[in-house]
Amino acid sequence: MPEVARAEYLEELANLEASALGGLDLVNTALTRTLEAVEHQDVELAQLVVADDDRIDGRYLEVHQALITLLATQSPVATDLRLISSLLHVLKNIERMGDQCVNVCKVIPISGNEPPADEEMVGLILSMGRQTKTLIVQAKRAFEERDVEMAQDLVRQDDVVDNLNRDCFRLAIELGDDADKREWAMTMLLAARAIERIGDNAVDIGEQVAFVVTGLFREFEDASHPEG
Amino acid sequence: MLGAATKRSAPEDSKGEMADSRGVTATSTEPVTAVAGQPAKTIEARQVNLFYGDFQAVEGVSMTIEPNKVTALIGSSGCGKTTFLRSLNRMHELTPGARVEGGITLDGEDVYAPGVDPVAVRRLIGMVFQQPNPFPTMSIYDNVAAGLNLNAKKVSKAQKDAAVERSLRGAHLWDEVKDRLDKPGAGLSGGQQQRLCIARAIAVEPEVLLMDEPCSALDPVATLAIEDLIGELKNRYTIVIVTHNMQQAARASDVTAFFNIEGTGKPGHLVEVGPTQEIFTKPGKQETEDYVSGRFG
């Protein structure tokens, strides 16, 4: 009899967790490239991010299927069940984060080859991106270490992203009446909004950390009842 | 009110002992038609210690078994869950040398109080066993009516017919056997035999049904049929089920109690009892978590 009962199953579950969270590394790479593409108006790099999103989608499908198989064959309960349930959520979040990078990269060609770029606006978007990358890394670590406090801190980190997003909006209004500039600002707002959503997804992953640890799901921040 | 021991209780008890091993108990009252959703009775166990001679099998079990709920007792072999189950209707004491300490009450009435007739207790708290055990030579009808036939009072044929039909319907068996009630019970399939035993147990209108691994000898289809039946029976009875099948506990019960032993020769004890949904998603104790997750051995 093996020292640990169900050793193979437990190893499989641990591998699937690593594989799912590895999706966050893929997202981090995609976001790094996305920001570079925004900074340099690099359409080719943007197209690479779009094409590479298949890897994130592939990871989602592969791990999702394997988790369903574990559910079907191993009857996981208690912590194992909560972990699998949360990984299914986290995978969906990761897949959405990848899609948001694609959304940003798709608006880059729209803004033209030599857009009337405003340095301050680009700077704000890059700051948002860097802060969001911090959130992605922190979400992954909080999950790996089952650290609820670290997961809850994602809300504070995400507030920084949200504030930068509002700054982008204000700046877009101030950019004046020039039609080209306004059009460019609009596309950049779409980019900013997409990055802001990546931050929200990182917070969602933090909520799953709390669920795995405590067995209770609650939203860290209730957007519908912000005062509550 | 639990029946007090009478002069008759000694011989009847020994008769009951034989009958009890078949899940049938003598009854001293006429069957009353059960009403769906009616409140059943609550069992309270307080610091129950159970012994076989010098060997203590169960130590310090305190729990409330709630009415109209299915309570599953789970735990590895030898953890005392079946012994505890058998103490609830005073079957434990049928084993020579067996002894009970602590208190067990049924709606506040001590089932071990001096003067309480064990047979009356077993009428109120029926038992269904692991192996379906219909009386092999008796017809299906007589199997169900067996408990009624042990009545002190004469039961009319019409009353008996009604009780047999009601019990067989209650056990989801009526449609399958209504045209062959005079055929031997042993001719039924395993799953049907177990439902026949459940019909026999409910024929005497108990308040509580104890089930000792009722599905372990059955195939998956028959198992699910019994689980569905258990889900329905809880509307009328308090149900306690011992099972080795954790998924069955998860599927069929409302409350789960986990028993464990610290080592060979040690008494079994209650580790944790709680809503089944909690025990299988976020148990309170690591010991429970390890067991329900299969991390034992």
Image (cartoon, helix red, strand yellow):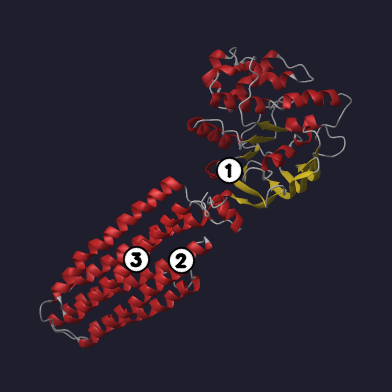
- Residues at marks 2 and 1 on the same chain: no
| SS at mark 1 in the image | loop
Query: Disc 2 marks which amino acid?
Result: Val
Chain containing mark 2 = A
Residue at 78%, 19% (x, y): give it.
B153
- Mark sitting on residue B115: none
Category of crowding for the residue at label 1, using alpha-carbon neighbours closer than 10 angstroms: few (below 14), some (14–19), many (at least 20):
many
Q: Is residue A12 visible?
A: yes
Marks 3/1: CA distance? 39 Å
Image x and y of residue B15, in percent: 78, 23
Query: Disc 3 marks which amino acid?
Result: Gly
- Residues at marks 2 and 3 on the same chain: yes
Q: Which residue matches tag 1?
A: B253
Image x and y of residue B146, in percent: 69, 19
Q: Which residue matches tag 2?
A: A209
- Residues at marks 3 and 1 on the same chain: no
Marks 2/3: CA distance? 16 Å
Q: Quadrant of residue B243?
A: top right
Residue at 51%, 57% (x, y): give it.
A79
Chain containing mark 1 = B
| SS at mark 3 in the image | helix
Q: Which residue matches tag 3?
A: A22
Q: Are marks 3 and 1 in contact (CB under 8 Å)?
A: no
In the figure, is residue A161 to the left or right of B232?
left
Image x and y of residue B40, in percent: 68, 38
Q: Residue furthest top?
A: B182
| SS at mark 2 in the image | helix
Category of crowding for the residue at label 3, using alpha-carbon neighbours closer than 10 angstroms: few (below 14), some (14–19), many (at least 20):
some
Q: Are marks 2 and 1 in contact (CB under 8 Å)?
A: no
Query: Disc 1 marks which amino acid?
Result: Ser
